Image (spheres, rainbow, N blue to C red):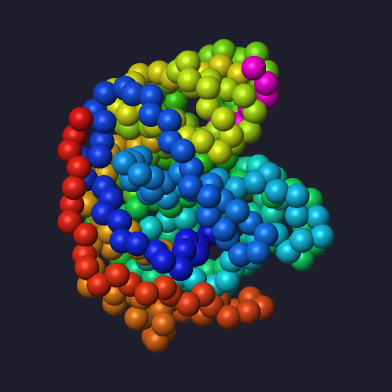
Amino acid sequence: MSNLDRQAILSVCGGRGFVVAEPVRELLTPRHVRLGESTEVRRLLPNLGRRMVGAWAFVDHYGPDDIAGEPGMQVPPHPHMGLQTVSWLHDGEVLHRDSLGSLRTIRPRELGLMTSGRAISHSEESPKSHARFLHGAQLWVALPDAHRHVEPHFQHHTELPTVTAPGLTATLILGELDGATSPGTAYTPIVGADLALSAGAETRLPLDPDFEYAVLSMSGQAEVDGVPVLPGSMLYLGCGRTELPLRADTDAGLMLLGGEPFEEEIIMWWNFIGRSHEEIGAARLDWMEGPRFGEVKGYDGSGLPAPALPPVALKPRGRVR
């Protein structure tokens, strides 16, 4: 999924300035953003005062939307660099096309992982014949400097490892959790997991104290470390935890996101992650005028034009607390 904001702003992210080095319970309120005619997302990252969680740099939650008789998701071809996109569904299907020639239909609890590296473009759309409901999350992972210029590639994994406990099934999306490892390629110490809780479940999930964590609520009524987390909201948990108490009054769906704090400062603008204003500007120009990002073949429509780039670079800010 793309950032379709026509007034995209430059954001300085990463570094340890925003990291909380101890356990906290910081509830993040989403910003509502329109994507096309029929899809609205709740944007949790970047958020006011909370830019990243580990290498996770962007989190959108959408649905469940009733798209019967509607076009559903329609995101035209657009570029990415310096990041990975993670597509995760609870309901519906998303058809992925990219400039490498990939064509895949992503279904619930299948991993669609696109590594942009130096440059790629892609589109995302609901198939013409699609399910009634669309519900999922789109996330970005920032690539560290050593790997941000890798050759672009796309992975589609239909079977993923699980971790179970009474009342809990955790499907590992990316990274490692409790001895299980995702087949998706990761470039930093990271974890992403889908947590399915049964009504009445009360359990504890093992965590890495060196990671910072957040939990996104997808559906149902659940408490995370004693805090009720409603669907479409996210609880930032800080670092220093060895386990996470979970409780559900109804069947509930959560997403656990975590990783080692991202050491490097990055600049995120529109659909790019770079290291300088000049690098971002060059990528924008390449998308508008050059062949760098390739062509998405088969999409019925034109590519997404880039918004105007603000002329002033941002300065790093924030402190460890």
Residue found at x 68% / y 44%: 64
Residue 211: name its quadrant.
top left
Is residue 57 left or right of 262 when viewed as pictured? right
> Is residue 252 found inside the magenta-colored segment of the image?
yes
Q: Nearer the viewer, residue 212 or 228?
A: 228
x, y percent for residue 56: 39, 45
Q: Give the magenta-colored segment's residue range.
A: 249-254
Q: Nearer the viewer, residue 240 or 231?
A: 231
Residue 278: name its quadrant.
bottom left
Q: Report whether residue 151 is seen.
A: no
Residue found at x 77% / y 57%: 130
Residue found at x 22% / y 68%: 312
Q: Is residue 183 above or below residue 167?
A: below
Q: Is residue 94 above or below residue 182?
A: below
x, y percent for residue 144: 28, 53
Residue furthest out toward the bottom = 289
x, y percent for residue 292: 39, 80
Q: Report whether residue 139 is seen.
A: yes
Is residue 203 left or right of 89 when viewed as pictured? left
Q: Nearer the viewer, residue 321 or 272?
A: 321
> Is residue 158 found inside the magenta-colored segment of the image?
no
Residue found at x 18% / y 52%: 316
Q: Is residue 40 above or below residue 232?
A: below
x, y percent for residue 19: 26, 36
Q: Is residue 212 above or below residue 270?
A: above
Is residue 312 left or right of 269 when viewed as pictured? left
Q: Which part of the image, by quadrant, shows the C terminus?
A: top left
Labels in figure, total: 0
